[in-house]
């Protein structure tokens, strides 16, 4: 028998998730086997700067021994348990308390899940249960926005968008899709951010009235949209849409899965964009990706109402075997401690503006339509014509080309249609950011020359 490469073994055994099948056939999988700080290494020993922190989540990099040590200690002390039947364990309680202390607005209670998807899914069930208990069983519809990403479970995926609904035949009768608040693309010529936000708020109100406010359970929103292309809302957006939601008693769920714990340069995305959530969903950076973790935080009002609903059933008939896992909670407590007390948030505030300024400089490139972002999340959107903002035709695969060229040079960035998305780890240094920007500039020149040949 011949010894097969890991690449072959992967292709022979793995059912691929979110992986372009044509590229896989062409390039094969990339197998990663170790990490050091912000870098990962493939099986050939090649080093890459992880410009997306994995999936936005490995925010403290790949060799944070304090997290490994805390995990080892907790495994030795008490390796795992659950939070059902009125039982709990110390790290889980301590993490709940810490998250409430750090919440961007007063929050009253927390429960834990394993991921962002199941946290959002949990919120949907909670809202439906709450409204039904309050005698408004028709309040089922969920407001979401075009280009949102809220996860891969059934309803979270339906919230995410039409492509998934089509691919899987997801139940979407109760999904209402709102506009994506992207000024560069959708504001009218000469329209200010404030005017654009006011227009979006008026449009939101029209949609609520058209649907019937008595049919709407809640709205989901990422403070800054991540996977949809790092869309920072126009100034005033949340300030203007929230009174509309309040007028109709519609709770706002902040999906902080990407933004939470520092990504925007603020501890919470809500603080960056002036959002006052009724419910917060967190995951990813919460454990710096060292353990699958998700969380749902409820305001006092949501807590009171959801608790009243639970009384009818004598419990919240919901939960996950490993939600609130003591090891995951111990790791998260340490990750949050490192972010808030060991200078990581300060680093994001130092490096983030340099990263953003660098991206804005790249916006002058003939191929770049918009450079956007906040803190350590950013995107470049390429256009064939800067004036008309006409996108490159799909066959140019501009995002793919840029990402591939970057990979060859040892930088992981994420293609998204004609855009690339960047989310360096929170530990990134000014030097590393400088190198990333230099490489991007070179690649843009090359790809631009290439597609215009
Ligand atoms: N919400 C947002 C904003 C996300 O970006 C993601 C994942 O990228 C999710 C939810 C889903 O999280 P998970 O993949 O952990 O289920």
Image: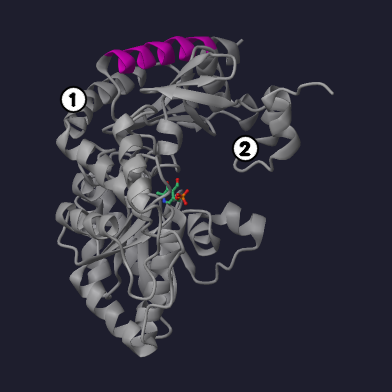
In reply to whether residue 435 is colored magenta, the answer given is yes
Q: Up-down: is 267 above or below 161?
A: above
Say which element carries label 1: helix
Q: Is the C-beta of the residue carrying label 2 under 8 Å from the nearest atom of ligand 1?
A: no
- Assign the magenta stretch its main secondary structure: helix
The residue nearer to you, when weighing 232 against 222, is 222
Q: Quadrant of residue 44?
A: top right
Q: Earlier in the sequence, mark 1 or mark 2?
A: 2
In the image, 217 versus 237, the foreground residue is 217
Q: Residue furthest right?
A: 1
Q: Residue 12: x and y, percent?
A: 76, 35
Left or right side of 114 for 403: right
Q: Do residues under tags 1 and 2 come within 8 Å of each other at their CB atoms?
A: no
Q: Is residue 442 magenta?
A: yes
Instruction: Specify start and end residues of the magenta stretch as a single range.
Output: 431-446
Secondary element under disc 2, as helix, strand or loop, is loop
Q: Is residue 329 left or right of residue 365?
A: left
Residue 165 spot, x, y in % from top left: 60, 59
Q: Quadrant of the N terminus?
A: top right
Which percent across, then down, holds residue 112?
Answer: 35, 60
Question: According to the image, label 1 marks what residue?
Answer: 350
Disc 2: which residue: 19
Confirm whether residue 214 shows in the render: no
């Amino acid at each position: 028998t011949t010894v097969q490469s890991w690449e072959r073994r992967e292709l022979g055994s793995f059912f691929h998730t979110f992986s372009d099948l044509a590229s896989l056939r062409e390039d094969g999988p990339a197998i990663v086997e170790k990490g050091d700080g912000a870098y990962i290494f493939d099986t050939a020993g090649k080093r890459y700067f992880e410009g997306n922190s994995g999936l936005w989540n490995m925010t403290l990099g790949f060799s944070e021994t304090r997290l490994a040590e805390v995990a080892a200690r907790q495994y030795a002390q008490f390796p795992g348990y659950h939070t059902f039947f009125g039982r709990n364990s110390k790290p889980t309680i301590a993490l709940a308390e810490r998250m409430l202390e750090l919440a961007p607005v007063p929050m009253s209670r927390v429960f834990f899940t394993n991921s962002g998807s199941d946290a959002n899914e949990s919120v949907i069930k909670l809202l439906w249960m709450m409204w039904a208990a309050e005698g408004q069983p028709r309040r089922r519809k969920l407001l979401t926005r075009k280009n949102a990403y809220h996860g891969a479970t059934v309803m979270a995926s339906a919230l995410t968008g039409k492509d998934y609904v089509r691919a899987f035949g997801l139940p979407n009768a109760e999904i209402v899709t709102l506009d994506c608040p992207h000024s560069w693309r959708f504001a009218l010529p000469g329209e200010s951010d404030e005017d654009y936000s006011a227009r979006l708020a008026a449009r939101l109100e029209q949609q609520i009235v058209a649907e019937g406010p008595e049919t709407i359970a809640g709205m989901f929103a990422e403070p800054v949209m991540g996977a949809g292309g790092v869309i920072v809302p126009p100034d005033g957006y949340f300030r203007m849409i929230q009174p509309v939601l309040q007028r109709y008693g519609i709770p706002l769920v902040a999906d902080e899965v990407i933004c939470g714990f520092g990504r925007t340069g603020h501890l919470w995305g809500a603080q960056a964009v002036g959002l006052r959530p009724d419910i917060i969903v967190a995951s990813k950076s919460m454990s710096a990706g060292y353990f699958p973790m998700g969380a749902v935080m409820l305001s006092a009002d949501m807590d009171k109402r959801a608790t009243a609903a639970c009384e009818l059933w004598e419990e919240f008939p919901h939960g996950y075997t490993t939600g609130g896992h003591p090891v995951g909670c111990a790791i998260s407590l340490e990750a949050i401690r490192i972010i808030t007390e060991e200078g990581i948030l300060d680093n994001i505030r130092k490096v983030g503006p340099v990263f953003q300024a660098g991206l804005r400089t790249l916006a002058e490139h003939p191929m770049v339509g918009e450079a956007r972002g906040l803190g350590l999340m950013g995107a470049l959107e390429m256009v064939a014509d800067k004036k008309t903002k006409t996108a490159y035709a799909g066959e140019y695969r501009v995002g793919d080309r840029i990402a591939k060229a970057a990979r060859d040079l040892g930088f992981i960035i994420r293609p998204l249609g004609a855009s690339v998305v960047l989310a360096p780890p929170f530990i990134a240094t000014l030097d590393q950011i400088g190198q990333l920007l230099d490489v991007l500039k070179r690649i843009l020149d090359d790809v631009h020359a290439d597609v215009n040949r």
